[in-house]
Image (cartoon, helix red, strand yellow):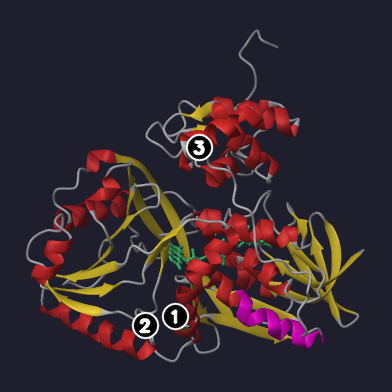
């Protein structure tokens, strides 16, 4: 049986960053992920915002880590070669109740140590954002709010963890955790391993995985969130991330100008509706209704996709209350669980890893840093961001970078090949790594070409390929008469 110092369970943003941060110490680390690839769970669908920390309660771990993480985000993204933009945000109100919410958030943000916050008059806000519906009564400006590439960040953390020696156990759902020889026997469907310590980052299933080894303390109820994505160009409708604080109770609209120039609307709050990632008619209807109220000139015919995410809402079994702070439990020696980490989990993924890793290292008596750890990852080649001359030189070296495979995104065969070499084994694994299928045609042009490359490079027949994991085959076999 393979033996490790630490087994990280779950390969979402939290697990990938946890594994990376653990490797800053002289530890032999393995990451066991149920699926065929990382970044397929909650981390697959979120709002991509790097929060400042003015939204969360003072004095909590969530707030402390969010404020710290926000300050360090430029450095983190530079280190890992992922794009990031500090667009700034305006939280806008249209009446006295929401005005009071904004005033409280300003005070709360200042208490939390968030820099640059300013309350703007409605007129000032409307001057900055011409597309907002008239009648804005006030706006809270937060210059530090950023927009990230959540997929890029997760893959970058994973690649960096691998480059630093983390052992990948993919396709390895954990089915049991047994205390053994002062550590844990980790039973997976791929086999068994032993680790002196275990960090459970299993997202929506983190409660069930903890309960393999400890009595229930926190349970997760899933909550759906719907989104609309509008095509390139629509991203110019706003210059900032816009949070709409509604006058009535409930969640307002968030508008996010994405890094690729698209516009993301959402998320809704749909209540506990099971973990399925399907959108709801009610949720999408609510988004359209809110968009008509807040951004009346926005052309919703530019919508190219709707999708849903699932939030893990944690509640304490002991006190029968919802939990609002980050929940990190340590129910048995050498076992930690990150349960129900919701927003701002993307912002804080690295910070959570950096907070917990030294505690794990200390428990194992390995607190001194590992001098061999390298935090940098070389960014993948992106011809469309290069000058003409650079592109020509690249194509001369590798002609695959001159063959456009996805017309909407201008993505080349060379990039898709690189994504497959970096670990993509499904159509969506390629999509999340390079952006194929994300444009206006939603993959009509590139799907068969990506499948052909996947099939060739993985040595798998096309009918065995998945769109996104088990149960998502795209082909069922040849046509009648083709054998
Ligand atoms: C709708 C929505 C919007 C959000 N927006 C933002 C935002 O704008 N900004 C922000 O900062 N944060 C945001 N977040 C939060 C952020 O996306 C999450 O906190 C983060 O992605 C959490 O990732 P995770 O690693 O905990 O979970 P996951 O990504 O789900 O990873 C858990 C992994 O564990 C694996 N797993 C499960 N069971 C097992 C098992 N038994 N054995 C092995 N592996 C297992 C799963 O396959 C999965 O890959 C948002 C979240 C949601 C849902």
The image quadrant that residue 290 belongs to is bottom left
Residue 312 spot, x, y in % from top left: 50, 68
Quadrant position of ligand 1: bottom right
Callout 2–callout 3 Cβ contact below 8 Å? no
Q: Pick the quarter of the image with the N terminus.
A: bottom right
Is 354 within the magenta? yes
Mark 3 neighbour class, 10 Å CA radius: few under 14, some 14 to 19, many 20 or more: many
The residue pinned by badge 1 equals: 67
Q: From mark 1 to mark 2, how far is it between C-alphas?
A: 7 Å
Residue 382 spot, x, y in % from top left: 53, 42
The residue pinned by badge 2 equals: 114
Q: Is residue 317 visible?
A: yes
The image quadrant that residue 54 belongs to is bottom left
Residue range of the region highlighted in magenta in the rendering: 353-365
Q: Is residue 216 visible?
A: no
Q: Provide the secondary structure element on which disc 2 rests.
A: loop
Mark 2 neighbour class, 10 Å CA radius: few under 14, some 14 to 19, many 20 or more: many
Q: Pick the quarter of the image with the C terminus.
A: top right
* Number of numbered discs: 3
The residue pinned by badge 3 equals: 436
Q: From mark 1 to mark 3, how far is it between C-alphas?
A: 34 Å
Callout 1–callout 2 Cβ contact below 8 Å? yes
């Amino acid at each position: 049986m393979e033996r490790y110092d630490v087994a990280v369970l779950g390969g979402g943003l939290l697990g990938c960053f946890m594994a990376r941060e653990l490797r800053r110490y002289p530890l032999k680390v393995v990451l066991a992920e149920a699926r065929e690839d990382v970044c397929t769970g909650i981390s697959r669908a979120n709002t991509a915002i790097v929060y400042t920390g003015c939204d969360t309660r003072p004095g909590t771990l969530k707030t402390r880590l969010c404020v710290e993480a926000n300050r360090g985000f430029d450095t983190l993204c530079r280190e890992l070669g992922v794009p990031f933009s500090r667009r700034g945000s305006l939280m806008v109100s249209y009446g006295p109740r929401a005005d009071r919410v904004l005033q409280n958030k300003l005070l709360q943000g200042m208490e939390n140590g968030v820099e640059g916050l300013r309350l703007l008059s409605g007129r000032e806000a409307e001057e900055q954002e011409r597309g907002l519906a008239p009648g804005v009564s006030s706006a809270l400006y937060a210059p530090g709010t950023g927009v990230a590439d959540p997929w890029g960040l997760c893959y970058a953390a994973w690649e960096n963890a691998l480059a630093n020696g983390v052992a990948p156990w993919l396709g390895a759902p954990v089915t049991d955790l047994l205390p053994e020889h002062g550590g844990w026997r980790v039973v997976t469907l791929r086999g068994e391993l032993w680790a002196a310590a275990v960090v459970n980052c299993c997202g929506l299933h983190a409660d069930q995985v903890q309960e393999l080894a400890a009595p229930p303390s926190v349970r997760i109820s899933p909550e759906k969130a719907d989104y609309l994505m509008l095509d390139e160009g629509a991203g110019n409708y706003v210059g900032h991330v816009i949070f709409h604080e509604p006058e009535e109770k409930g969640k307002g609209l968030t508008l996010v100008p994405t890094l690729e120039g698209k516009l993301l609307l959402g998320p809704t709050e749909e209540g506990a509706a099971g973990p399925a990632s399907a959108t709801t008619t009610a949720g999408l209807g609510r988004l359209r209704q809110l968009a008509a109220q807040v951004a009346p000139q926005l052309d919703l015919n530019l919508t190219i996709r709707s999708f849903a995410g699932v939030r893990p809402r944690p509640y304490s079994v002991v006190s029968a209350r919802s939990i609002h702070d980050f929940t990190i439990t340590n129910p048995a020696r050498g076992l930690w669980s990150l349960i129900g980490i919701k927003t701002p989990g993307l912002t804080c993924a690295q910070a959570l890893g950096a907070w917990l890793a030294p505690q794990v290292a200390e428990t194992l008596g390995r607190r001194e840093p590992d001098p061999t750890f390298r935090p940098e990852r070389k960014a993948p080649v992106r011809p469309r961001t290069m000058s003409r001359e650079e592109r020509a030189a690249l194509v001369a070296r590798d002609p695959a970078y001159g063959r456009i495979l996805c017309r909407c995104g201008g993505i080349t065969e060379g990039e898709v090949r690189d994504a497959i070499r970096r670990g993509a084994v499904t159509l969506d694994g390629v999509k999340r790594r390079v952006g194929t299928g994300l444009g206006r045609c939603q993959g009509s042009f590139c799907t068969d070409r990506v499948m052909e490359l996947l099939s060739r490079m993985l040595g798998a027949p096309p009918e065995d390929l998945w769109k996104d994991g088990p149960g998502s085959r795209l082909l069922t076999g040849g046509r009648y008469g083709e054998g």
